[in-house]
Every structure is written in structure tokens, then in C-alpha cells.
Image (tube, helix red, strand yellow):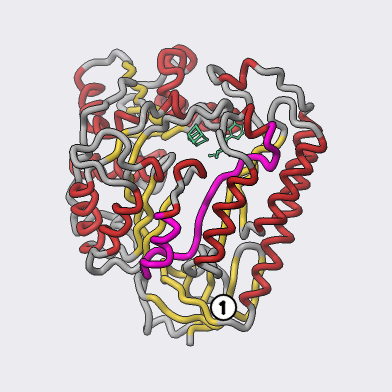
């Protein structure tokens, strides 16, 4: 989401005459788009600003802005802690970046803009030909913002506010626009995309209908979405996988924990069995679907046996990759009021254990691709010596491919014979 917001701010600023520099020393404006999902992300921001502060001394006209979730959560505190900042913007103020920069030029008092905007629709800035960062073959499109789920560990509902869906017509227009400028794959984005259409639309349609509609857009070759919540993931969406050729066979479905008690205190509102039922139904409709997930270890009260349940579910589902985290208490969330009972060294060990298990699962699945042909959307040049192109297969495995450099370009879909696998990557030769 932050990557998409950053791209959007760059595009808006481009239309006000700003161009990306390669070196921070050359910049007139530096924005740090922050994340507050875990404490580590926050620490990174503070150390980054520590390195940026001296630039103000050498260039007094330099504008320094903090955007994103840390700004939303602690705007005034950020200004106090880092008085050299010119402004702080919340994630719902991305559209206002141009105005914010102008305001700094007009007054020299730092300010904080963190209101939530429940009315506004997105404008779709023109993608000009001389834009350095034109959309690549794979482009993000935000379909819903905010989150109403309030999982007890999560800061997002507080920093990104209530759910609001974008009108389907507006989405179609944006997707057509991106395709015209080179996109072939669209990744629909939201904290909970499956909740699309529940709120904020003039003509409400459910998520699966949005998928069917977008699949008709001419020139679209691949469609993905992320992130899903098991409770809003419907049977109709499973059917869409079967019906729609452009909808690729990959699903990212966070489980967070493999234990029902922990799921309950996390307020995920579903059981492991319900989750597995969905997965089994999807696998029976789409046998070559790959599954990825998010997992937290060391949630308050998690016992060794409860942790073992998570390992069991990972093995049972056979995830091709996972985002794995050690629980990090977030001020203002309900879980922050619970006793953070799992010692740091135990959290660390559990995290290592699930990473090891995931590595084995990934390796096993990687092997199953060896000697097979996969379809790859070329996204650019490969940095791996001996390989010309990089891209992804439908199941979201990274693929490095050998082939004649003059014969293919980003946006082409090619068939690659897989010869090797390493980690979550495949490599081979274009047929
Ligand atoms: N601690 C650790 N991981 C977290 N996540 C969200 N909040 C926390 C937290 N407080 C993880 C969840 C979520 C992903 C985006 O980040 O797994 O799905
Ligand atoms: Fe956070 Fe996702 Fe839960 Fe929303 S659904 S509260 S974004 S973990």
C-alpha cells in the first residue's frame, strides 16, 4: 500500500514540476513515507531521518516531509521529536501532497495534516510520456482504503481509518489508462479487498463482480489482488478463479495463527477449520493454485503447544511463501493492553522455526517446477549473471530467464523451461 501511495505522490508532484533525483544531496524535497505496523519499521524511520537532518544545514531550502502511518498516529509528536521536519501528512492525505509542499513555501511554520477523508474519490493523474517512472508491466490499483476489522494486534484501522471503496467506473478508467501506458498485469490493492463494495459506493457491487467486470478490459493479461481476509472471502470469488482466465492462480490469505484460542484473542473471528475449508474448496476448483500467508508468532499468551499448531497448519496448507513476524505491541491497540507474555528470545526462536519450515515448504514446491514450462510476464532485466530477463509466473514465483535480449521486452509473456530453483525463485530458458 505504501509503495502504491509513494508512486501516487510522485505522479502528483511530477505534475507540479518535481523530478526524482538519484542522490538525496541533490533534492529540494525529501519525503519519507512511513509504516507503523511493527516497532522495527518505526525505528528505521528515525534512523533514516537522523541521516537526512544534516542536509538541512547544507541546503536551508530543502523541504523534509514525513508521510504515512507514523504521521497519522503521532503527527504532533513527530514534529516535537524532529523539529527540522516541515510537515507531516497522514496516509489519507496523499492527494494533498502538492498543496502541502506549496504551503511550506508560503509559511515557515511546520504543520500536520492527518484528517480522514470519507468523501473524496481519487483523481487519476495523467501519465505523461516523459515520466521517468511509467507504470511497469505490473501495476497496483487501490480499490478500497481503510480497514474495519480491528484485529487486536493491528494499528491499521487507526492509521488508515474506515473502509471506503472506489467506484467501479473510476477503477475501470484507471485500469484502461494504465494498460494504455504499458501495464499488462493489475494488482488490486486494499487492506481487505474482499470487503470491496460494502461501504461508500453509489452503485454497490460485491468484490467478485468487480473481478468479472475488470477481467473484460481489453489488453489486461493478468489480474491479482491482495490482501484478503478469510471471513470476507466468498465462494463466488473461488468460482471467479475457475471462470476467469486472467485471474492468476495465486491467493494470499493471511492466517496469522494456527490455533483457535489465539485466533479468538486476535479477533480474527474465524476458526482454523473454517480457514482450511476455504483452502480445500479453492484447491479442488483450482488444483495448481499457490497459497501464501501472513503469520505472527509470540502473540500475548501463545503457549508452545499453540505455536506448534501454527507449524501444523503451515504444513497442512503447504504455503509457497509466507510473511512471518514476531509480535510487536502497538500503542493504542487492544492487544497492547494484554500482557506481552512471550519473552523476546522465545519469539525469536519461534520465528526462526517457522522460517525454517517455510524454507523447506518453498524448496519442495520449487522442485515440483523443475523440468516444467511456466508462463512468465517479463518485468525487466535480470540482475543474475547469465540471465537476461526477470518476471513472475502466475503463481507469483520470481523467474530469471535466458533468452535473446533483442527478441523480448518488458510486458511480453513467454514460456520458460525451468532448470533450477533457489529460494522462492525459478530459473530457466525461454522456449
Ligand atoms: N506485530 C506483528 N505483526 C503484525 N502484523 C500486523 N500487526 C502486527 C503486530 N502488531 C502483521 C500481520 C499482518 C501483516 C501486514 O503484518 O501478519 O497481516
Ligand atoms: Fe489489520 Fe488486516 Fe486485521 Fe485489518 S484485517 S485489522 S489490516 S490485520
Asked if the residue at label 1 sits under 8 Å from ligand 1, the reply is no
How many neighbours does mark 1 have within 10 angstroms: few (below 14), some (14-19), or many (20 or more)? few
Observer able to see residue 1: no
The image shows residue 338, relative to residue 147, as above or below, that is: above
> Hey, which residue is sitting farthest bottom in the picture?
431
Rendering quarter of residue 58: top left
- Tell me the residue at 30%/53% (across/down): 209
Q: Quadrant of ligand 1?
A: top right
- Tell me the residue at 55%/52% (across/down): 278
Relative horizontal placement of residue 154, taking residue 171 as reference (left or right):
right
| Residue 205 position within the rendered picture, expressed as x and y whole percent measured from the top left | 27, 46
SS type, badge 1: loop
Relative horizontal placement of residue 15, taking residue 160 as reference (left or right):
left
The reply to whether the magenta stretch includes residue 254 is: yes
Question: Which residues lie in the magenta part?
Answer: 236-261
The image shows residue 294, relative to residue 97, as above or below, that is: below
| Residue 82 position within the rendered picture, expressed as x and y whole percent measured from the top left | 46, 18
The reply to whether the magenta stretch includes residue 222 is: no
Identify the residue position indicated by label 1 in the image.
386
| Residue 20 position within the rendered picture, expressed as x and y whole percent measured from the top left | 32, 46
Rendering quarter of residue 177: bottom left
Q: How many marks?
A: 1
- Tell me the residue at 73%/42% (across/down): 351
| Residue 67 position within the rendered picture, expressed as x and y whole percent measured from the top left | 38, 29
- Tell me the residue at 53%/32% (across/down): 37
Relative horizontal placement of residue 62, taking residue 122 as reference (left or right):
right
Who is closer to the viewer here, 431 or 380? Answer: 431
Amino acid at each position: 500500500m505504501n509503495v502504491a501511495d509513494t508512486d501516487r505522490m510522485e505522479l502528483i508532484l511530477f505534475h507540479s514540476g518535481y523530478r526524482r533525483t538519484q542522490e538525496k544531496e541533490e533534492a529540494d524535497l525529501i519525503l519519507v513515507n512511513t509504516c507503523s505496523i511493527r516497532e522495527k519499521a518505526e525505528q528505521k524511520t528515525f534512523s533514516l531521518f537522523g541521516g537526512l537532518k544534516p542536509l538541512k544545514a547544507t541546503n536551508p531550502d530543502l523541504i523534509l516531509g514525513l508521510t504515512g502511518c507514523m504521521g497519522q498516529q503521532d503527527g504532533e509528536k513527530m514534529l516535537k521529536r524532529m523539529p527540522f521536519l516541515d510537515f507531516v501528512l497522514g496516509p489519507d492525505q496523499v492527494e494533498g501532497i502538492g498543496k502541502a509542499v506549496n504551503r511550506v513555501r508560503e509559511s515557515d511554520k511546520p504543520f500536520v495534516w492527518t484528517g480522514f477523508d470519507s468523501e473524496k474519490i481519487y483523481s487519476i493523474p495523467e501519465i505523461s510520456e516523459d515520466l521517468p517512472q511509467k507504470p511497469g508491466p505490473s501495476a497496483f490499483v487501490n480499490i478500497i482504503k481503510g480497514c474495519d476489522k480491528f484485529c487486536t494486534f493491528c494499528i491499521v484501522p487507526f492509521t488508515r481509518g474506515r473502509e471506503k471503496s472506489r467506484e467501479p467506473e473510476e477503477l475501470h478508467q484507471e485500469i484502461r489508462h494504465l494498460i494504455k501506458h504499458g501495464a499488462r498485469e493489475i494488482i488490486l490493492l486494499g487492506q481487505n479487498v474482499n470487503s470491496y463494495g460494502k461501504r461508500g459506493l453509489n452503485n454497490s457491487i460485491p468484490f467478485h463482480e468487480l473481478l468479472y467486470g475488470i477481467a473484460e478490459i481489453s489488453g489486461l493479461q493478468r489480474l491479482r489482488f491482495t490482501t484478503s481476509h478469510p471471513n470476507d472471502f466468498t465462494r463466488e470469488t473461488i468460482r471467479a478463479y475457475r471462470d476467469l482466465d486472467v485471474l492468476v492462480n495465486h491467493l494470499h490469505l493471511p492466517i496469522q495463527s494456527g490455533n483457535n484460542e489465539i485466533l479468538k484473542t486476535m479477533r480474527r473471528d474465524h476458526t482454523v477449520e473454517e480457514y482450511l475449508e476455504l483452502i480445500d474448496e479453492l484447491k479442488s476448483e483450482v488444483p495448481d493454485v499457490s497459497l501464501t500467508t501472513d503469520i505472527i508468532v509470540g502473540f500475548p499468551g501463545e503457549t508452545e503447544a499453540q505455536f506448534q499448531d501454527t507449524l501444523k497448519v503451515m504444513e497442512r496448507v503447504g504455503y509457497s511463501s509466507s510473511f512471518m513476524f514476531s509480535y510487536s505491541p502497538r500503542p493504542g491497540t487492544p492487544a497492547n493492553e494484554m500482557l506481552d507474555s512471550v519473552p523476546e528470545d522465545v519469539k525469536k526462536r519461534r520465528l526462526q522455526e517457522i522460517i525454517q519450515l517455510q524454507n523447506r515448504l518453498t524448496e519442495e514446491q520449487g522442485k515440483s517446477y523443475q523440468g516444467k514450462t511456466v508462463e512468465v510476464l517479463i518485468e525487466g532485466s535480470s540482475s543474475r549473471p547469465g540471465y537476461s530477463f526477470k518476471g513472475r509466473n502466475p503463481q507469483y514465483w520470481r523467474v530469471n530467464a535466458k533468452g535473446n535480449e533483442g527478441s523480448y521486452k518488458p510486458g511480453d509473456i513467454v514460456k520458460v523451461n525451468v532448470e533450477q530453483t533457489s529460494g522462492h525463485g525459478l530459473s530457466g530458458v525461454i522456449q
